[in-house]
Amino acid sequence: MVMASPLRVLIAEDQYLMREGTRRLVAEVEGVEVVGTAWDYDSVLREAKRLRPDVVLMDIKMPPTETMEGIQAAHVIKRERPETGIVILSQHDDESYVWALLEGGVAGYGYLHKVRVGDVDQLVRAMREVAAGGSVLDPRIVRDILAHRSGKRGTPLADLTPAEREVLRLMAEGHSNTSIAGRLSISVGTVEKRIASVFSKLSLPEEAAVNRRVAAVLVYLRETMPGR
């Protein structure tokens, strides 16, 4: 029997206690290998090039300026090695950070609140998802975006029923039809009908890409940002 290769993770965080704590939590998960750590913009680029990890788990703000080094580094890493997944950890719920991260595309990117580090299972699921080319957005961010968009006049989101918006939110979090059905206590068939209605109302064609539903939802939300 051929054993699957471990998920190789590089952790970038400027605060030592947070970096070491995250490293220890992630390293204890079976099938995951923490191959290295970094603490600022230059070191994460250097280590990503040297170690060639499957995923970089990275803080959004790091030295030298403590602004958006994580997002800037993510774009550089993606250009050099597109197959590397990126999960950004942030204490900020500001949508502008999300759109800055996803300005060039959504495949292989994740954006999670730092509180998710305490839920190791969810964190590892997110890392595996982006390593496979999927997309993950923190549920709280999704809820805020959907609430903001649904209140806007003239947006197709306003035409969605509450049940369809709930399905859309779970889709954006990366849940399968079966998972959505379980969470909402409805049949898979009902989920499929609601998804079909969501795509119809949002005029979003299904694309033959990994996790296409998440990508479609995020692209739609990004394109409806005020001023874009």
Image: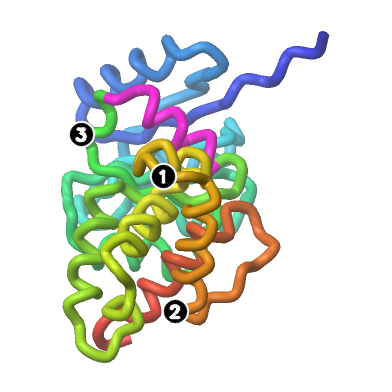
User: Does the stretch in magenta take in 128?
Assistant: yes
Say what amino acid the circle numbered 1 marks. Answer: Ile
Q: Is residue 12 visible?
A: yes
Q: Quadrant location of residue 107?
A: bottom right
Marks 3/1: CA–CA distance = 30 Å
Which residue range is magenta in the image? Answer: 119-130
Asked if disc 3 and disc 1 are in contact, CB closer than 8 Å, the reply is: no
Q: Is residue 205 left or right of residue 225?
A: right
Label 1 neighbour load within 10 Å: few <14, some 14-19, many 20+: few
Q: Is residue 47 visible?
A: no
Q: Is residue 152 above or below residue 216?
A: below
Q: Say which of 138 and 186 sits in front.
A: 186
Asked if disc 2 and disc 3 are in contact, CB closer than 8 Å, the reply is: no
Q: Is residue 119 left or right of residue 67?
A: right
Question: Which label was assigned to residue 186?
Answer: 1
Residue at far right of view: 1
User: Does the stretch in magenta take in 171?
Assistant: no
- Mark 2, mark 3: which one is toward the viewer? 2
Q: Secondary structure at mark 2?
A: helix
Of callouts 2 and 3, the N-terminal one: 3
Residue drawn 50% across the image and 72% down it: 199
Q: Is residue 52 above or below residue 98?
A: above
Residue under label 2? 201
Say what amino acid the circle numbered 2 marks. Answer: Lys
Residue 92, percent across and down?
A: 17, 51
Say what amino acid the circle numbered 3 marks. Answer: Val
Residue under label 3? 115
- Mark 2, mark 1: which one is toward the viewer? 1
Residue 154, percent across and down?
A: 27, 91
